[in-house]
Image: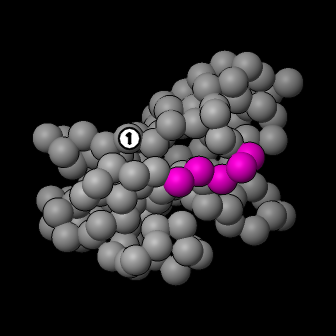
Amino acid sequence: QVQLVESGGGSVQSGGSLRVSCAASPYIYSSRNCLGWFRQAPGKEREGVAFIYTGGRATVYADSVKGRFTISQDDAKNTAYLQMNTLKPEDTAMYYCAADDREYCSGGDGYNYWGQGTQVTVSA
C-alpha cells in the first residue's frame, strides 16, 4: 500500500519557484509526528532539507535552503508541501518526502515511510 506520494516536480530556470506536494495516507498523516523533505542529487548523499512537527507546526530547515524554502501542511488534505523559491542549479535533485514518529524530526534520515520521489531540475 502506497503511503506517501510526491508530485509537483519539474524543470525551472534559476531564480524560479516550484511547489512539491506529498499526499499521505490518513493513517500515516495522523500517526506520525514528523514530516520531512529530503533530496538526493546524482553522486551525492541524501540530504535533509526541511522538516515539520505535525502537531505544533514547528519547522526546521537545512542551512542551504533557509530563507528560500518553506514547508507546510494541510490537515484537511493529509498533505505536506515544500514551496521552493529563488531556486538554484544546486537545488537540482530527486526530492522525497518521509514520515516518522520521533523526538527530533531533523535527526537523520532513518525515517520509516518514504515516497517514490519527484524530480526537480533547475537550469542556469
Q: Position of residue 93 (x, y in %)?
A: 69, 48
Whether residue 97 is visible, yes or no, is no
* Quadrant housing the C terminus: top right
Magenta span main SS: loop
> Closer to the camera, 123 or 48?
48
* Residue at 79 percent of width and 58 percent of height: 42
The quadrant in which residue 43 appears is: bottom right
Q: Is residue 79 above or below residue 54?
A: above
* Residue at 74 percent of width and 46 percent of height: 64
Q: Position of residue 53 (x, y in %)?
A: 36, 59
* Residue at 67 percent of width and 42 percent of height: 65
> Closer to the camera, 106 or 111?
106
Side of 87 where 55 appears, left or right: left
Is residue 3 within the magenta segment?
no
| Residue named by callout 1 | 72
Mark 1 secondary-structure assignment: strand
* Residue at 45 percent of width and 42 percent of height: 71
The quadrant in which residue 4 appears is: bottom left
What amino acid is found at the position of numbered circle 1 in the picture? Ser
Q: Is residue 63 above or below residue 28?
A: above
> Closer to the camera, 87 or 57?
57
The quadrant in which residue 44 appears is: bottom right
Residues rendered magenta in the picture = 60-64
Is residue 62 within the magenta segment?
yes
* Quadrant housing the N terminus: bottom left
Side of 89 where 24 appears, left or right: left
Q: Is residue 1 above or below residue 42?
A: below
Q: Is residue 37 above or below residue 85?
A: below
Q: Position of residue 5 (x, y in %)?
A: 36, 53
